[in-house]
Image (spheres, grey):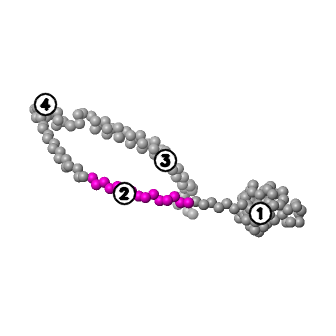
């Protein structure tokens, strides 16, 4: 380095950019100015008698002649309407037949050797050892509160056993 060379200035980081302005600032400026322009236009449009300077000159110089307007209206006679009546026969009501199947199982002597589980949530006189026994008796699916319902018959715990 020689003594004749200029010394470069020290490094200065660039200034951070201005933060973006939120949308409400635009509304704070644009909306009032738009309302002002609208009000100014309405004020200018409603000033005077609406006709400009020509109407004032014509009104001062001469009387306006009356204008006669004749309007003729021709109405065609209506065409006759065609009325058609259709009567449909009512359909017979469908017959609904409901079949109810009732199965009653008489409990045994109450010994534990039968494979039946007693004391479960069902609380009725019937109880089933498994879903095969419930299906054989015609009681599947078994719901909570039905005779023969048990938690062991309900795998997913939704209240319906032997689905």
Q: Which mark is residue 60?
A: 4
Chief SS of the magenta region? loop
Which numbered disc, 1 or 2, marks the residue that appears first in the sequence?
2
For discs 1 and 2, the disc positioned in front in the rendered view: 2
Mark 3 and mark 1: span between their CA atoms? 63 Å
Q: Position of residue 48 (x, y in %)?
A: 24, 33
For discs 4 and 1, the disc positioned in front in the rendered view: 1
Which image quadrant is residue 46 in? Answer: top left
Mark 1 and mark 2: span between their CA atoms? 60 Å
Left/right placement of residue 141 relative to residue 64 reads right
Residue that mark 2 sits on: 86
Q: Is residue 93 magenta?
A: yes
Which image quadrant is residue 162 in? Answer: bottom right
Instruction: Give the residues in magenta.
Output: 81-95
For discs 2 and 3, the disc positioned in front in the rendered view: 2
Q: Are marks 2 and 3 in contact (CB under 8 Å)?
A: no
Mark 4 and mark 1: span between their CA atoms? 107 Å
**Compared with residue 98, is residue 136 higher up or lower down, i.e. above or below?**
below
Residue that mark 1 sits on: 153
């Amino acid at each position: 380095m020689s003594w004749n060379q200029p010394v470069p200035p020290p490094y200065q980081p660039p200034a951070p950019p201005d933060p973006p302005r939120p949308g409400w600032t635009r509304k704070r400026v644009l909306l009032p100015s738009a309302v002002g322009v609208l009000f100014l236009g309405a004020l200018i449009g409603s000033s005077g008698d609406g006709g400009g300077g020509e109407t004032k000159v014509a009104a001062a110089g001469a009387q306006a002649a009356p204008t006669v307007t004749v309007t003729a209206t021709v109405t065609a006679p209506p065409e006759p309407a065609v009325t058609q009546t259709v009567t449909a026969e009512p359909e017979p009501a469908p017959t609904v037949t409901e079949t109810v199947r009732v199965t009653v199982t008489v409990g045994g002597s109450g010994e534990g050797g039968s494979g039946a589980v007693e004391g479960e949530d069902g609380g009725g006189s019937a109880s089933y050892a498994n879903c095969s026994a419930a299906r054989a008796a015609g009681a599947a699916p078994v719901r909570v509160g039905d005779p023969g319902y048990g938690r062991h018959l309900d795998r997913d715990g939704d209240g319906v056993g032997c689905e």
